[in-house]
Image (cartoon, grey):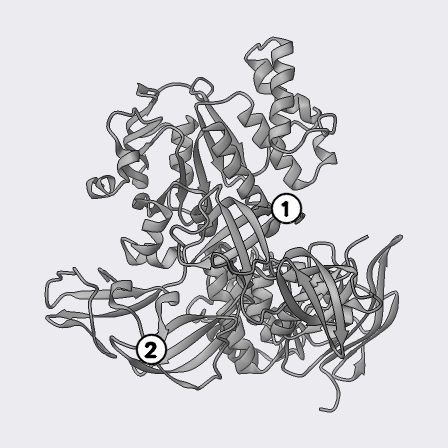
Amino acid sequence: MATEAVRLDGVTRRFGAMVALHEAWLKVRHGEFLTLLGPSGCGKTTLLNLIAGFLAADGGEIFIEGALVTATPVWQRDIGMVFQNYALFPHMDVARNVAYGLATRGVNKAEAAQRVAEALALVKLTGMAGRRPRELSGGQQQRVALARALVIRPKVLLLDEPFSALDRNLRGAMQVELKEIQQRLGITTIFVTHDQGEALSMSDRVAVMSAGRIHQVGTPEEVYRRPADRFVAGFVGDVNRLPARLLGREGDTAQVAAGACHFTVPAAPLAGLAPGAAVELFLRPEQLAPAPAGGPALLEGVVVARVYQGDRMELHLEAAGVPGRVLLRLPGHAPGVGEHGSHLAVQAQPQPDAMAFPPTT
Amino acid sequence: MDAQVADMPASLAAPSRVPKLSVQRIGKRYGKLDALLPMDLDVAPGEFVTILGPSGSGKTTLLQIIAGLTEPTCGRLLIDGRNETDTPPHRRGIGVVFQNYALFPHLTVAENVAFPLQMRRMPAAELNRKVAATLEMVGLGGLQHRFPRELSGGQQQRVALARCFVYQPALIIMDEPLGALDRKLRETMQLEIRRLHRDTGATILFVTHDQDEALALSDRICLLNQARIEQLGTPQDIYERPASLFVADFIGLSNVLRGTLEAGGLRTADGLLPLPPGATPASGSLAALVIRPEHVELDPAEGPALAGRVTETVYAGSEHRLVVTLGSGASLILRRTASQGSLPLGAPVLLGWPAERAQLLRP
C-alpha cells in the first residue's frame, strides 16, 4: 500500500465561466477520515462529486488506490456514497434498498442476504429489514443509506452533509456512531460539511476550502491553533481581530504588540512587513479573560451583550479602535463579571495560540 | 405545574402585574391523540419566553393556539387580562415572524414593512416615518428600494423582523425565525433580536428546537416534551437544576449514573456515590445522579474517586472532551480547556466531582 487511497493532482472544474474548483491537490491516506470543510459555494461538494464520478474534471487527474480513474464511470469506481437527503427508494423496503448495489454488481442471492444482514447489524437496524423508508425516522433513514453505501465494501466512503437534516441531539449521536463504524472497518472516508464543530470532532484531517480553493489541509488542532490564513482562522472557530504592531522577527517567530501586551506569533504570514508595520492580531475567545485591576490590559471595552450558554458565558464587547466586537468565553455563568453596559479590561491567557496577519487592504 | 410556578423569580410572578399572555388549562386533542395536555403558562409584559422542545413535543400546536390559527379543545387564553380564546387571529394584536420570511416578492423592502401599517390605515406621513425608523433599527437603512430577491437570507429575515416590529404588536411570536440561516449569521441575528427586545420592550414568545439559542435569548424557557411542560424556568435554572433526566439530556451534555438509594448515598455498579447536600431520598428506590461534564474533575481532592480509562477523545477547538469508561462499563464525559490539553487513549484516570454539583433525579 505505497500509494494513497485517493489522490487529486491539480483537478479543476468549471461551470460556465465560474471556476467551482481551482487546481485541487489532495492526498487522502488509507483508512483516514478526511473532512472537506467550507461555506456553501466553496467547491467542497463539487470536489466530492468529482471523486465519485458524478462530475467530470475539466483538468487534472484523480487516482483511487493508485489507479487513474479520471475517465472511469461512477459504477466502476468502487465508491460508497451517502447524501444529505438519504436518497432511498421509497417503494423498496430497507433490505432491498441496502441490497440494491449488490444486485447491480451481480452478487448472488445467498451472499447478498448475508451481507445485507451484516450491514444492517453494523448500523443497528437489525429487525427493520421489512420497513419502508417512510416508516423510519430521519436518523434511521440515514443509517439505511449508510448501510447501502457500506454493503458493497467500497474502497472509499463519501458522505455529503449526511447529518445536516437531523436535529442537534440526533446529529451528535450519529456522528459518534459513524466514527465508530469508520474506525472498526478502517475505511477511507471523505466527509463534506459546513459545520466546523462536526469537522473538528470527527476528522483525522480537515481540508478547509473557500471559493474553489483548498486553503489548508491539517489535523483539527493544526487548522484551529495554527490556521494558514485569515479565512481559515475565521471559519474553523470564532476569532477576535485586534489592531497590533509588528515589533520584530526572529527565525520562525515574530513579536507583535497590542495594548500593553506582547505576543509571539508565527512569522510566515508576516513575510515582507517591516518592524513597526500595522498587523491584525487573531485571538480565540477562550484565550481572553478579564484583566485584574491595575494589571496590563490588552484592551478595554463596554459589555454590549451577555449570552448564557450553560457551561459558559459569552461576553460581547465594543472596544475603541477595534472593528467588530470582541468575544470572551468565561466558564460557568460568571456572576458579577461583565454586567451589561459595564466597562471591562481584558487580558490574554498565558501563552495563547496567537496569530497575526497583514491588515486587509 | 404549581411547584414550577412557585419557582418563578418573584419579579416575574408578582401578582400585581397582569400577564401579557396567560395560557390557562389550554389543551388540544386530535381524536384520541393529545397534541397538547392541558397546561398553564403566564408571560409577563416585556418578557422573552422561549418554547423549546423536540419535534412532536407540541410546541407548534401551542404556538398556533396562541396565534389563533388552531382552536384549543379546552382552556382559556388571556391577552392583557382579556379573554381572547375565540378572537380571530388578525384581531389579537399578535405579530408573527416565521422561518420562511413570507415576504411579498413583488413589493420593495419599504413596501413590505409598510404593509401592516397600510392595513391599519395609518396616514402616509406617520407611516413613512415609522417605516424609515424601523428599517434603521434593524440595520437596513438605505436598502428600502430593494426587492426581497436582491437581499441575502439574513437581510430578508431582518425585513421580516422590521415588518413585525413596525406596528408595535402587543405580543410577538417568532416561530424558528433563524432556522434557515447558517451558524454565524444565526448568532448575529440572535444578538439583533436581543437588542430589538431590549430597545422596544416587546413581549416575545420564541419557538425553537435549538437549545443554545434558547439559553442565549430567553428570560425563561418553557421546555415541552410529549405534549406537556417538562420544565419552566430561567436558562440557568434549566441548565443547572434540570427537573428530569429528559431536561438534563436535552439541554447540554450530561453524565448520568444510575443506582439504588441507601442511607449513605447512591449505590451504583461503580460504588457508593455521595448525594448532593439537602437531598432527602427514600432508601431502596431507584435514582440517578446527573453531573455536567464541566464539573467532573481529574484526581479530585475530595469526594468519590472513580477509576476508569480514557476511551475516546473529541477535539472541539476551544476545548477537548474526554470520554472515560468506568469499571462498570458506564462512561463519563469531561471537558478540558485547550491549555489543559487532552489525554492519550487508554490512560488510567481517577474522576470525581464536588458533591453539591450533582443533581439527584428520578430514573
Up-down relation of residue B18 to residue B180 (above or below): above
Marks 1 and 2 sit apart, C-alpha to C-alpha, by 44 Å
Q: Residue at x 39, y 29 (%)?
A: B66
Mark sitting on residue B351: 2
- Depth check: A330 or B325 in front? A330
| Quarter of the figure with the N terminus of chain A | bottom right
Q: Residue at label 1? A: A320
Up-down relation of residue A96 to residue A339 (above or below): below
Horizontally, residue B271 falls left or right of residue B252, namely left
Q: Position of residue B119 (x, y in %)?
A: 57, 14
Q: Position of residue B195 (x, y in %)?
A: 52, 36
Quick check: can you spot residue A150?
yes
Label 2, secondary structure: give it: strand
* Chain for numbered disc 2: B
Q: Quadrant for residue A49, please give it.
A: bottom right
Q: Name which residue type carries label 1.
A: Ala
Q: Residue at x 54, y 80 (%)?
A: A183
* Foreground disc of the pair 1, 2: 1
- Depth check: B326 or B127 in front? B127
Quick check: can you spot residue B182?
no
Q: Position of residue A347 (x, y in %)?
A: 55, 60
- Depth check: A144 or B341 in front? B341
Q: Name which residue type carries label 2.
A: Leu
